[in-house]
Amino acid sequence: MNEPLKKPRFFATRGHLMLCHNTSCRQKGADLLHLALTRHLEQEHLMYYKSGGSVRYTLSGCLGACSHGPVMACYRQTAQGLEQGWYFGMTLPLALQVARSIQQQTPLPGEHRFDL
């Protein structure tokens, strides 16, 4: 007998961060960045499933700027439509700045962006 699937809880988000976890970015520090960023997102209650958080964060495959990693992309819905930010040479302080901008709905930082 199959039991009906229970509907999962939905966590509203304001945006999505994706950190490349492919070989080249990992060789440039993406593993350590991932661990530190996860810890800080949780501590600052920015992570979508934590109290008050609205930023979704996941690891991703290649984001296409392999020799310039770690690479991070973000997406969020604004009044003007879907906004995206693509970052190279990502650091923890910059990643947190991007996450805070998403949470607070303020402009994304321009430093290290390669989509502009």
Image (cartoon, helix red, strand yellow):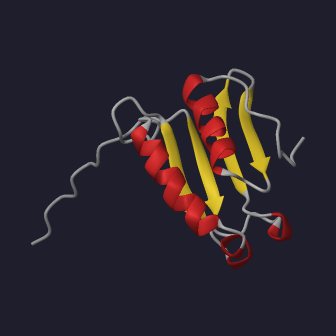
- Expressed as whole percent of the image width and height from the top left, the position of residue 27 reads 70, 76
Quadrant for residue 51, please give it. top left
Counting from the top left corner in percent of width and height, residue 9 is at 29, 43
Q: Residue at x 62, y 23 (%)?
A: 105
Residue that extends furthest to the bottom in the rendered view of this protein = 23
Using the image as rendered, state which of residue 107 and residue 96 is in the foreground.
96
Relative to 90, say whether 48 is above or below.
Answer: above
Residue beneath the point at 82% across and 36% down: 110
Residue 94 picture location, percent across and down:
69, 43
**Residue 22 percent across, percent down from the top left:** 67, 74
Q: Nearer the viewer, residue 62 or 88?
A: 88
Of the pair 27 and 57, the residue shown nearer to us: 27
For this orientation, the residue located farthest to the right is 116
Q: Could you tell me which residue is drawn at 50 percent across and 60 percent down?
A: 35
Q: Which residue is pictured at 63% across the width and 49% down the height? A: 92
Quarter of the image with the N terminus is bottom left
Specify whether 7 is left or right of 65: left
Count of numbered tags: 0
Which quadrant holds the C terminus?
A: top right
Where residue 15 sits, quadrant-wise, is: top right
Q: Is residue 6 left or right of residue 40?
A: left
Question: Does 78 sit above or below residue 23?
Answer: above
Question: From what the image shows, is residue 100 above or below residue 31?
Answer: above
Image position of 7 (left or right of 63): left
